Image: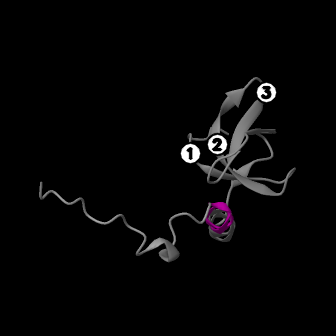
């Protein structure tokens, strides 16, 4: 089965959902949702991820992001430059 780059697929060998990248020899290359190291998967075993699996993978990716853009950073802006010279 041919998959489009970017499609979210379930790999039963690793029990993970990955974003399809390309083929490399006999393998399909998948990357974790949100980025990370690619892994090789058997293309015959892959199937499209269910809605639940896609949501879980996206949630895992969001939770893994650094917490540098959260609401606790509000109010930490630099004061405006004083242009009265």
Q: Earlier in the sequence, mark 1 or mark 2?
A: 1
The quadrant in which residue 36 appears is top right
Residue 63 sits inside the magenta stretch:
yes
Determine whether, in the image, residue 28 is placed left or right of residue 34: right
Of residues 53 and 47, the one drawn nearer to the viewer in this rendering? 53
Callout 2 crowding tier (Cα within 10 Å): few <14, some 14–19, many ≥20: many
The quadrant in which residue 53 appears is bottom right
> Mark 2 highlights which residue?
20
Q: How far apart in space, not on screen, are marks 1 and 2 (Cα)? A: 5 Å
Callout 2: SS = strand
Q: Nearer the viewer, mark 3 or mark 2?
A: 2
Q: Which of marks 1 and 3 is in front?
A: 1
Callout 1 crowding tier (Cα within 10 Å): few <14, some 14–19, many ≥20: some
Q: Which residue lies furthest to the front in this view?
A: 85
**Residue 74 sits above or below residue 22 on the image:** below
Mark 3 and mark 2 in contact? Answer it, CB < 8 Å. Answer: no
> Mark 3 highlights which residue?
26
**Image point (73%, 41%), residue name:** 37
Determine whether, in the image, residue 46 is placed left or right of residue 85: right
The quarter in which the C terminus is drawn is: bottom left
Q: Main secondary structure of the magenta part?
A: helix
Of residues 85 and 45, the one drawn nearer to the viewer in this rendering? 85
Highlighted range, magenta: 59-65
> Mark 1 highlights which residue?
6
Q: Which residue lies furthest to the top in this view?
A: 25
């Amino acid at each position: 089965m041919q998959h489009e780059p970017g499609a979210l697929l379930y790999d039963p060998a690793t029990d993970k959902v990955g974003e399809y990248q390309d083929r490399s020899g006999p393998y399909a290359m998948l990357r974790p949702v949100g980025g990370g190291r690619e892994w090789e998967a058997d293309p015959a075993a892959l199937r499209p991820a269910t809605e639940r699996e896609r949501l879980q993978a996206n949630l895992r990716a969001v939770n893994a992001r650094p917490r540098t853009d959260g609401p606790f950073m509000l109010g930490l802006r630099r004061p405006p430059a004083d242009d009265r010279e």
